[in-house]
Image (cartoon, helix red, strand yellow):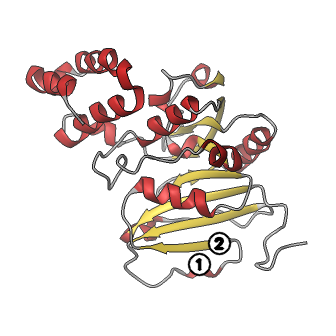
């Protein structure tokens, strides 16, 4: 039996895709699947709805706002399934793997589960041993949103949201996933880890452009926000690691940045 929208009443997983403006043209949806809902948050829409918006398993939400973290938070507010998967408009979902992990998440007690994703050649971005057991505070910087499933009620109960000062379109252009994981842990939640490959995605990220001032400044600000006083150690360590990219002057600025 389904609900008034034709969706199965026992839906388990929402694929929550964030896109901005013309990015809607990149969205390629999976085929309909029993128990799967698709939520597309389209910020600053610039054209009529695409044809797939009429599918019964799809909700397309137009938003005048800008900012990836704002999009993720809106999705968390709107999701009506037990598990949500924060997804990008240029990624390809591996639904069988995600489905199995979503089922595990519901009975695990974790607030989230983190898997892996692969590049366009099918090569995983993390070794399998990095995704076993639980995610700890030092693992948080390695987490990407497209490899993270959220147990929605637990996340809501913890009161954790994506920090809207961080992420694409925000004041600081990166670091929102790391901060989210650290906030979950700080609030008393746990984050499981599994080597399942959940998606395929181009491997270039904002962090690959570390030499750009807006990127390294966001990295420094994110460490300060996410780790608090521990950033006194972590920021010099990162500055030393990236010294050949930053140069000595900017390495010092990285350490001393006051967000």
Within-10-Å neighbours for mark 2: few <14, some 14–19, many 20+:
many
Marks 2 and 1: in contact by CB < 8 Å?
Answer: yes
For mark 2, give the secondary structure: strand
> Eyeballing the image, is 234 above or below 108?
above
Q: Which mark is residue 133?
A: none
Tell whether 23 sits left or right of 61.
left
x 38%, y 26%: residue: 228
> Eyeballing the image, is 139 above or below 86?
above
Q: Position of residue 6 (x, y in %)?
A: 79, 77
x 34%, y 35%: residue: 222
The image quadrant of residue 234 is top left
* Residue bearing mark 1: 53
The image quadrant of residue 220 is top left
Cα gap from disc 1 to disc 2, whole angstroms: 6 Å
Q: Nearer the viewer, residue 221 or 61?
A: 221
* Residue bearing mark 2: 58
Count of residue discs: 2
First in residue order: circle 1 vs circle 2:
1
Tell whether 16 sits left or right of 254.
right
Within-10-Å neighbours for mark 1: few <14, some 14–19, many 20+:
some
């Amino acid at each position: 039996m389904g609900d008034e929208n034709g969706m199965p009443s026992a839906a388990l997983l929402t694929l929550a895709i964030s896109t901005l403006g013309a990015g809607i043209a990149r969205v390629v949806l999976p085929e309909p699947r029993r128990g799967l809902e698709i939520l597309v948050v389209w910020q600053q829409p610039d054209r009529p709805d695409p044809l797939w918006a009429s599918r019964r398993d799809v909700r397309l939400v137009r938003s005048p706002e800008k900012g990836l973290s704002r999009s993720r938070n809106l999705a968390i507010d709107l999701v009506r399934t037990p598990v949500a998967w924060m997804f990008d408009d240029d990624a390809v979902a591996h639904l069988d793997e995600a489905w199995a992990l979503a089922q595990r998440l519901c009975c695990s007690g974790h607030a989230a589960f983190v898997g892996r994703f692969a590049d366009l050649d099918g090569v995983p971005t993390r070794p399998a041993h990095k995704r076993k057991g639980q995610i700890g505070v030092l693992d948080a910087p390695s987490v990407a949103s497209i490899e993270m499933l959220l147990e929605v009620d637990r996340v809501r109960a913890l009161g954790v949201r994506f920090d809207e000062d961080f992420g694409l379109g925000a004041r600081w252009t990166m670091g929102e996933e790391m901060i989210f994981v650290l906030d979950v842990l700080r609030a008393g939640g746990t984050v499981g880890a599994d080597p399942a490959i959940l998606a395929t995605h181009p491997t270039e990220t904002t962090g690959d452009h570390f030499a750009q001032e807006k990127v390294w400044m966001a990295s420094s600000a994110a460490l300060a926000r996410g780790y608090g006083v521990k950033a006194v150690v972590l920021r010099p360590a990162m500055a030393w690691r990236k010294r050949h990219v930053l140069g000595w002057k900017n390495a010092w600025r990285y350490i001393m940045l006051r967000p």
